Amino acid sequence: QVRLVESGGGSVQAGNSLRLSCTAETRAFPTYTMAWFRQMPGKEREFLTAIRWSGVADSVAGRFTMSRDAKSQTFLQISNLLPEDTGTYYCAAQKGVAGKGNSYYRDARNYAYWGQGTQVTVSS
């Protein structure tokens, strides 16, 4: 079992940047593929980026940059925020992912662990 805790959300003005954090409470952190998704009101959860221990596995084009440290955290840097970035941002984790194509990382059903989400509100 892995507990994920997101932080760093809030209300920001368009054009600014924001860095979200996700702390994974597990001693086996390096063995997990981590990902960020977001969900806008009334819409399905949307993939943003995924990272394995060896580096970024998949990422949508644009303003999202994901990184991870050696201990327990992953980060999502969002640059040039737009009002349409408003939504809830979720961290996800799946153990032992290797040799998968992009379609695997982008499917929320492939992640066993999820955080509670952190809200981002962007005003124009």
Image: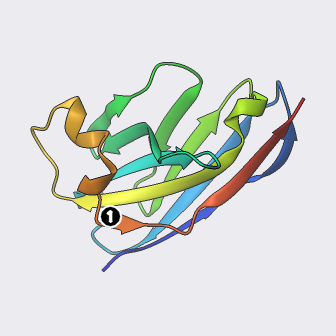
Extreme residue in the bottom direction: 1
Secondary element at tag 1? helix
Question: Considering only vertical position in the picture, is 116 above or below 50?
Answer: below
Indicate left or right for 86 with 35 as reference.
Answer: right
Residue occupying the point 71% across, 31% down:
84
Indicate left or right for 22 with 29 as reference.
Answer: right
Residue 81 seen from this side: yes
Question: Considering only vertical position in the picture, is 11 above or below 17?
Answer: below
Residue 8 seen from this side: no
* Residue 60 image offset from top left, x and y in percent: 43, 25
The type of colouring in the image is rainbow
Image quarter (top left, top right, bottom left or bottom right) of the C terminus = top right
Q: In front here: 62 or 29?
A: 62
Image quarter (top left, top right, bottom left or bottom right) of the N terminus = bottom left
Extreme residue in the left direction: 99
* Residue 83 image offset from top left, x and y in percent: 78, 32
Residue occupying the point 52% across, 55% down:
90
Q: In front here: 47 or 18?
A: 47
Extreme residue in the front direction: 42
Q: Residues within 10 Å of mark 1 (few under 14, many from 20)?
A: many
Image label count: 1
Which amino acid, mark 1? Phe
Residue 43 picture quarter: top right
Residue occupying the point 68% across, 35% down:
85
Indicate left or right for 92 with 12 as reference.
Answer: left
Residue occupying the point 84% across, 28% down:
14
* Residue 116 image offset from top left, x and y in percent: 55, 69
Question: Considering only vertical position in the picture, is 89 above or below 29?
Answer: above
* Residue 19 image offset from top left, x and y in percent: 67, 44
Q: Which residue is mark 1?
A: 29
